[in-house]
Image (cartoon, rainbow, N blue to C red):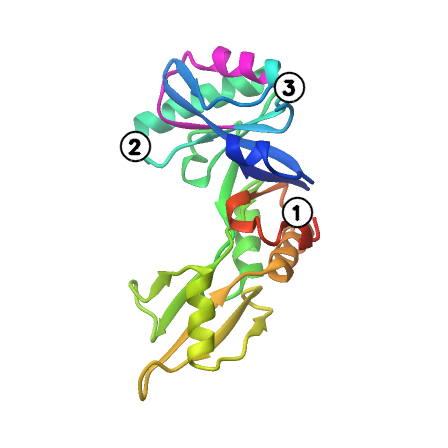
Amino acid sequence: MDIYVIYSADEYMTTHRRTQCAFLSYIARRNTLLSEKLPEDARGGMMIVASNDIGEHIAPVIYDECRKRRYSAVFLDADEDAADVGNALGEVSASLSRRGLTVFCPISFADFCESAIPVAEAAVSGGELEEHISLLTRRNRQLALSIPRICAKIKMPMTDNSTTAISRREAEALADRYDASPHFSPQLVTNYFLYSPAPHECSYVLFDDSRSISQKLRLAKHLGVSSVFLTYREIADIAREIAF
């Protein structure tokens, strides 16, 4: 299983690196590739291209950058589900694949990008993470996972608006305020603690640390996931403790 850590240009220049790098530094605007300035020694790994406005003739430009930087993979990222975006991504991913590059795309575009490996998010606030990933691997011939570092509070009973992302500092403050003890959930593969903000109310906080991230990496490998993505700014304080 390939493990990529996503860096900005500034993070790459100031960080000790232990895994393959994915560079969050490129934007495609029609048939032009724009880039954050990367240091000359930035080589290998993957380029991530934000590509909502991608043009079908951008593939040779992307390929030239990959040859220059010795990237072996491209993640064509997009957050608009419009069919015209999907069709353009499909054409570009097929062209890059024919040139020998490994191509990734968001799982929402998997039907458009048959030559790309779909990327899904490995995060659940209920149920079982293993079941969630197993279902995705059964539906997709190949699968990559983005593993976010979870930190969220959840009000019970759960509704569409019951989950709120919080900072790690806020999570620590809640644990101190309510004298809450953390536990590990093997079903969710993350840590949690319960607290009661008012009589007859119950909420809990989910939060990842190096142990839970390491467990998620092992689970992904066990279930046959081909590649995983971690974001450096989320794991910077625990990166050295994660069992890559």
Q: For numbered disc 2, what is the local secondary structure? A: loop
User: Residue at 50% across / 20% down in the picture?
Assistant: 94
Q: Write the residue at 46% across / 35% down.
A: 110
Sequence-first tag of 2 and 1: 2
Q: Position of 112 compared to 119: left or right? A: left
Q: Which mark is residue 70?
A: 3
Callouts 1 and 3 close, C-beta under 8 Å: no
Amino acid residing under circle 1: Gly
Whether 106 is drawn above or below 162: the answer is above
> What percent of the width, then of the height, locates residue 184?
59, 71
Q: Name the residue beneath numbered marker 1.
A: 224
Q: Amino acid at mark 2?
A: Ala
Tell me, yes or no, whether the highlighted magenta stretch contains residue 43.
no
221 is higher (above) or lower (below) than 199: above
Separation of residues labelled 2 and 1 (CA atoms): 30 Å
Q: Nearer the viewer, mark 3 or mark 2?
A: 3
| Crowd class of label 2 (few under 14; some 14 to 19; many from 20; radius 10 Å) | few
State left or right for residue 84 relative to residue 179: left
Mark 3 or mark 2: name the one nearer the start of the chain.
3
235 relative position to 106: left or right: right
Which label sits in the foreground, 1 or 3? 3
Helix, strand or loop at disc 3? Answer: loop
Q: Residues within 10 Å of mark 3 (few under 14, many from 20)?
A: some
User: Which residue is disc 2 drawn over?
Assistant: 82
Stretch in magenta: 48-66
Q: Nearer the viewer, residue 16 or 165?
A: 16
What secondary structure is found at the residue carrying circle 1? Answer: loop
Q: CA distance from mark 3 to mark 2?
A: 32 Å
